[in-house]
Structure formats: C-alpha cells, structure tokens
Image (tube, helix red, strand yellow):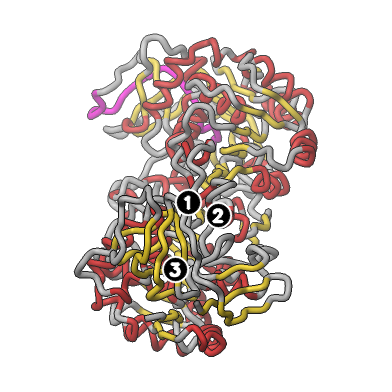
Amino acid sequence: MDALQFDLKSKQLSLIQLPVPSKLAENDVLIKVAYAGICGTDLHIAEGAFPCGEKVVLGHEFSGVVEAVGSKVNHVKPGDKVSVDPNSGCGTCNYCTDSNYHYCEVGGLNNTIGIYRNGGWANYCVVPNNQVFKLPEKISLEQAALTEPLSCISHGWDKIQPIPIGKDILIMGAGIIGNLWACVLHLQGHRKVIVSEPQEARRKLVANLNTGYEIMKPTDLQARKAANPKWGVDLIIDCSGFGPAIEQALDLLNPGGQLCIFGVASPETKISVSPYLLFKKELTINAINVNPFSFNKSLGFIDAMGDRYLAYEKLGIKVFGLNQYEAALAALKTGTIAKAIFKID
Amino acid sequence: MEVLEFDSKKKELCLLEVPVPPKLSDHDVLVKVAYAGICGSDLKMLSGDIPVADKIILGHEICGTVAETGKEVDSVIPGDRVAIDPNSGCGVCPECADGNYHYCECGGGNNYVGVFRNGGWAEYCVVPARQAFLIPKNMAFELAALTEPLSCISHGWDKIQPLQIGKRILILGAGIAGNLYACLFHLNGHRKVTVCEPQEGRRKIFDDIDTGFEIITPNQLKERKAKCPNWKVDVVVDCSGNVNALEDAVELLNNGGLLSIYGLAPPQAKFRVSPFLLFEKELTINSVLLNPFCFRKSMKYIAALNFRYLGFEKLGVQVFKLKDFEEAIRALKSGCISKAIFKMI
C-alpha cells in the first residue's frame, strides 16, 4: 500500500510502499482509509518543531471503512463507515482514572495515532477498537474527516462554558480551526462574533461561510480599540498561536472576560501578562489540549451542521491525492486554502 | 469624631476631628465603628499605586453597631451589630443585571466605601443599609472584622472549584490572605498544601495557625524544583503579587493545573509565560476581584472557623488605636504581623 512516512532524523516526508497490515490483535480494527486531513500540527511535525515517533506514517484525522476486525471486536464490522479518534490513555494511571486521559504519560499525546503510531496517510491503518467510532447514517466519509478537529473544538467549547447568547466574541485566525469555531458558534445561536485574520485569502474563505460575522484585519481591531477605548469583547478564541496577537488580546477583553488559547504557539514563544490587568478585569486564560471524551459530541455537531457548514468548498478545504502531498503542504502553508485533506482510493 | 483622612494629592494620612455625619438619607445607616482593618490595598492607596478619591476617610473592612437608621431602613435597627460590605453596584447597568456588580462602572470599585466614599477609619461611618449585614448573635465582634477580607477569599475559593481532596496546592505568600486561604483549605479537609513565604516573621506566624501545612522559602521551593522535577502542584493560589514568583509557579503546575491570582501586583509589573506550555499542560489562569455575593458566605465561614483558626494572636493580627496609625502601618509593612486592625471601642 501507499503510505506517507515521516523520518524524524532526516525530517523527510516520503511516499513509500508498505505491506498492508496482515495480522490483527484481537481488539484491533483494520480500516481502509477514505479521507485523511493535514493538521497544523502535522506541519509543525514536518518542520521538526513537534515531537513524534522516529519513523511514522502521519495522519491523525481520518475516516474510512472497516476492512477487518480482531476476534474480540464486536461494535463494528467489515463494511462499516467509521471515524478514528487518534488519542487514548493507558486507562490505569492517576490522570486516566481521574477522567483526564489526555494528560496520560503513556497514552495521551505520547501514543497518538499518526504521531507516535502509524496513522491515516496510507491506504490502510490499524486502530484499537475503542478508538473507532461508527458513523451515524447521515454523516458522509467526507464530513467525518472533520470529526477529529471538531472534537478538539468541542472540548474547548465545553471548557469555556457558560457563554450566554449575546456575548461579544472574537475569533483570532481564520484557518480551518477559526472557521470551524465560527460554525460551532453560529450553529448555537451566537451572532455577535468578529473574526480577525491578517491574510486576505483567508478572510475571503471565512466570508464564504455566510455567517454574517464581521471579518477584519488585526490592525482594524487595534484601530477600533484606539477609537473607542470602552469597546471590548467578552471571549477571545485564539486560533492563531501568534504570540504578539495573544498578548494584545488581553487588552481587548471586557471585565470578566476570557481568553481561550486554542492555537498552538511555537514552544519558544512567550507573552508578557500584567497580573494587575488580570485582577482589575478579573480575566481568565484557558488553554485547550486535544479532545478527551469528545468524539461522540463532535459527531453530534457534524450531524447537526451538515453541508450547510461543512461542505469542503465552504470551509476552504481542498482535496489531494497522497502522491500530491508536496502540493498539498505548499498550498496549506501559503494560506490559499484553509485545509488540505487527502482522498485515498 | 476622630477620623483618619487621606489626602491623595499630598499622599498624607492625618488624624482629624470632624463632626459626626448629621443627616442620614432614607436608605442609609449610621454605624458606630468597632473594628476597621488595614488591608494590603490600603497600603497601595497610601503609596499612590491605587487610585482613590481626593480627600477620603479610608477603611473598607468594617464592623460596628448601628447608631441610627434612615427612615426607609427596616433591615437593621439601632443597637444591631453589623459588618459592612464596602462594595455595591448601581443595580441597573448590564454588568449588574448579569450578576457581576463588581464590574459595575458606577458602583463596584468606583463607589467603594473607604475608597471613593468615606470609610471606617473613624468613630462613625455612613453606609447604605443593604451593605450592612447583621452579625450572628454568637459571633465574636472581633472576628466579624474579618468578614470583608474573608469574603474576597470566599470569592476566590469559589473560583478554584471544583477541587478534590488530595489535590496538591501551593499558596504563594503568607500574609493575611495566604493565611485565610490556608484556613479555608484546612477547614475543607485539604491536607496536601504547601505555603511559600520569604519573610521569617510571617513563616512563624503561619506555624501558629497549626494546620500542619508545610511552609517553605522561595529558595527552598526552587531547590525542590531542581531536585525533584516530578514535584508538581494542581493549584497555585498567588497571594504575593510578585511576578517572579508567578513565573516560577506556572512551571510547577501539573497537567490541567490552575493558577489563581489573588495578590495585587503593581500595575506596571508583567510576567512572561509560554502559550505552548499553557497548551501542552492545558493550564488555566484566573484572577479574583473583590467579593460579589460573598458576604453571607464569609460570615458562615467565620462561624465555622471561629477561634480555632481566626483567633487574632494565631493569625498574627494586631489591634491598634486609631491614633497609633503610624505604628500600625509600620508593623504591617515590616511583616512582623500579618494584619493590623483599628479598634475603636
């Protein structure tokens, strides 16, 4: 089978031939991959800026069809359409037994499919049964490729509650994550939302979602604040991971406001925070890490959103073949598309 | 009557003779002050770091006896012992209507008794009746003087919930705020608490509270961090307002950890933090402003804590006469006491 393997030592991504995994452990599921996304994290990995296995088939956002199941698997059968949760925990450590399996030092980020174990940028992938989710009737394989990114947003959404309708919200960054946040907010009735994005192409993409949200440049935001120092927002969702933007965001918050750090900044980036400002406005800073217990919730979102929100052309998603990976990565980096997804036949 | 008036232009605190306020409006009460505390924020007002009215009688931690009531007041009668909540909102702005009266721009901090209207460093003080809370019959008068500081801690307490027994807690600073937090942690059954305090005098006072909590110096904390990199805490409550301590503390947090900022830092001070670290460990930073809806809760805590925790000699609280204000302020700044309270009776 075709597989896109990353070599950590040489920092090289290569299309190689691997045998289709032939022997399944009793709890494993062999999946014929249909769609597999390229995540911002994958870009960081490809640059060597994010830890991963030594030689690993990347791809942690994917959907597919069950090809074969191990002897003890009974919740899915060959032919079922499924989506894969790449994260899991060991099940026995203190984090796992406290319901925080995303902090697990054995599982968690350290055992992620497509980062530490072979993932979905291949024709086939082997996954433990408890990470395989059968798709509801209405959800297509195409839409299901978004289950993983939406599951992370779903976890973030849970962590920032309660957000009553009518609160002023700012999304920083209109890549796919900012766009999906806009969808989640719009679906749930939020109308007072601003999206800030420096790249013109991405501002056009988010306008396609037709949410009626105000879209502006970061410099416009600063100008608005300068013109009216009393203007502010109640919630900022950072999807940019850009230090200076995160730092300035704190000044834009209303009393009681919340900054939600969702975009992943580079490990070296630091921001300066005034504790007095935090105190005076009683601000909260919340960071979001992956998707514990959020896969079914994400499927719930996808079911409710449908193509009104999730059609690929609306979200700025472009489909590529595995052999077009270089073009896919390049398009993603330039910002002409919001996301690249491999369609694997 | 004798009062301590602060002239914020000259930065001078003077003991003066002024007439007892002669006429009460319909909804006000005249309180004969029994105890009035000196808060850390009072010291910052005296030094000009926090804005106050031009000429003002300070003192926002007040208890006393009702001397007279306006004609519409029916919640208290002359002779009742009351503790005064210095904070209120206008009641009609969006912040007040949303239950956040501590963000109110007309009330809130800007209508604060002892900051923007005359407070309790005086023999008598006029306050709106709805800010005068009846002290339960069996509560010692002197303990009621702690209602206001403990109401702010109570708000902070609510903001770190839920917090399971067994979580490891670090308190930065063993002034009165750190001590009161420690009392609440102990009362609520927490035993894995470490307190970090640079001043020897304060460490000794802390030992007198007899919680069995570990008390160490910032250097010892640094040494432990170097020796045992696995020693992590789940919650840091900052009562120091020291940005270096904050920077160190963020790195001690466990996955899913919370930094709660209670101590008041100088307005210009900033701490540096890595958004990647916040993401990787899914940290939360929040802050605590004043005491919304916490006065009654605070009185209930006082009833439960009582002399076991709150006896003045245990807490390191020293009582002074109004005329000895210079000595009181000096003692407080030196750290040989954790709090100074004026006694007027």
Give the distance between the C-alpha atoms of the residues marked 2 and 1, in whole angstroms. Answer: 7 Å
Question: What mark, if any, has residue B61 been given in the picture?
Answer: 3
**Magenta residues?**
A57-74
Secondary structure state at the residue bearing disc 1: loop
Q: In the rendered view, would you say B6 is above or below A193?
A: below
The first of marks 2 and 1 along the sequence is 1
Residue A253: image quadrant is top right
Q: Earlier in the sequence, mark 3 or mark 2?
A: 3
**Amino acid carrying mark 1 in the image:** Ser
Can the viewer see residue A147?
yes
**According to the image, label 2 marks what residue?**
B111
Q: Which element is circle 3 on?
A: loop
- Residue at the location (41% across, 85% down)? B318
Q: CA distance from mark 3 to mark 1?
A: 14 Å
| Badge number at residue B88 | 1
| Residue A153 location (% of width, % of height) | 50, 32
Direction from residue A179 to residue B66 in the image, left or right: left
Look at the image and tell me whether residue B258 can be seen: no
Query: B19 above or below A227?
Result: below
| Rendered residue at 48%/66% (across/down) | B60
